[in-house]
Image (cartoon, rainbow, N blue to C red):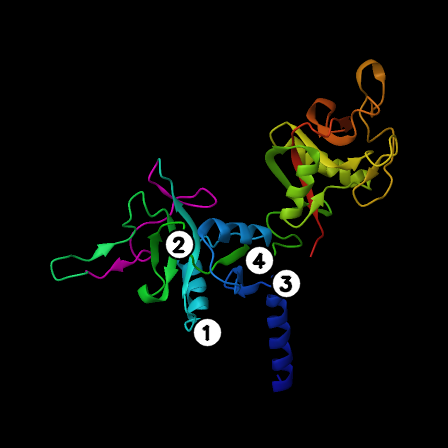
Amino acid sequence: MFPSTIICLLLLIIGAVAANCPEGYEVVGSKCILRYTGGYLTYDEAATYCTQHFGRLPVLKDCASFLDVTSYVNDGYTSDFNNSYWLGATNGTLTNVWQWSDGAAVQMGAPYWARLPPQNAEENLETEPSGGTRQNCAFVADDTDWLFRDIECTASFNPLCSRPSVNGLCVHPFVLVGTQCVHISTIIYPWHEARNQCGLVGGDLIVFDDCDQYHKVALYLNEQEHNAYWIGGSDEAEEGQWRWVDGSPMTMGLPYWAQAVFGEVEPDNPGKQNCLELNCAWMYRFSSAWCSDARRVICEADPI
């Protein structure tokens, strides 16, 4: 193979890898990492920043991801004045159990946690975490070779934001259902807040413009815990004119809309119920509901 051909293939491979992360994030092992350079933040501030950028503080459950991320911050960022970074791990003050932000237990001991040098000749080496219930947030720092340490959550460090690389056509937490990237939130919200929550993960309330695709999502919901879900339709702007959140008009009647009591086809209660739900009581057909009601949420994002 000619050298020029090899170079072109390498460039294609590198480009394919880079394309696996959204704008602002860098490929670091199997993760996408965003490094914040705007100053130092407390743990809560750092976690909020990452959420706003559709990520989370790093969760390092295995040696591979631990080495990938710590090698990344060690390569080119060791000259920072405050060369320490928050991790997505906390110690519950009531349970005294360290957990990652996804609820998994944090692995303890070697090779992850640091051993602090003694302050004097009489002291022994102390293995982190050593702060008891006072130091409830985890971080890594260059002065202990990027091993895990604990500290008060009000300390100020650099945040790193992490998100998985693209899985097929959909970015985490979205999964491919038919032709749509779908994410279900099991926390209940009113309709407008539900839409805000979809925005926080890079999407919007789901829209259906194809009957076959709607059927696939309805089957997917049947596999979940039966419940009611907000989707992206309302007639708040003009009573009786139901539109999707993208501004397109909705198809009325069967097969989308449910039959309410006495055979009346939804939507009912005009002027009162202005937001659209999928409810297991109606076999996940469209039905109107009060926008102030709390429902689970179905979000949709564009495929990559």
Q: Can residue 2 be seen in this view?
A: no
Q: Position of residue 233 (x, y in %)?
A: 78, 36
- Give the structural element (helix, strand or loop) at label 3: loop
- Pointer 1: residues within 10 angstroms few (<14), some, or many (20+)? few
**Disc on the earlier residue, 4 or 2:** 2
Q: Indicate which disc, 1 or 4, sits on the residue closer to the N terminus.
A: 1
Residue tagged 4: 165
Viewer-proximal residue, 213 or 148? 148
Examine the structure image and report whether residue 15 is included in the region drawn in magenta. no
Q: What's the amino acid at mark 2?
A: Ala
SS under mark 4: loop
Question: Which range of residues does the magenta coloring cover?
Answer: 95-118
Q: Name the residue under label 3.
A: 23
> How far apart are the alpha carbons under marks 3 and 1?
20 Å
Q: How far apart are marks 2 and 1 (CA)?
A: 24 Å
Image coords of residue 209 (percent x, y)? 82, 42
Q: Which comes before the other along the chain, label 3 or label 4? A: 3
> Does label 2 or label 1 sit earlier along the sequence?
1
On screen, residue 284 versus residue 251, left or right, reads left
Q: Circle 2 is placed at which residue position?
A: 155
Query: In terms of image quadrants, where is residue 73?
Result: bottom left
Mark 3: few/some/many CA within 10 Å (<14, 14-19, 20+)? few
Q: Is mark 2 on a helix, strand or loop?
A: loop
Front residue of this view, candidates 291 and 218: 291
Residue, disc 1: 76
Which residue corresponds to the image point at 67% horizontal and 43% vertical from the top-left? Answer: 196
* Nearest to viewer (mark 3 / mark 2): 2
Instruction: Kindly report the distance in space between the C-alpha atoms of the residues bearing marks 3 and 2.
Output: 29 Å
Q: Residues within 10 Å of mark 4 (few under 14, many from 20)?
A: many
Mark 1 vs mark 4, CA separation in Å: 22 Å
Callout 1: helix, strand or loop?
loop
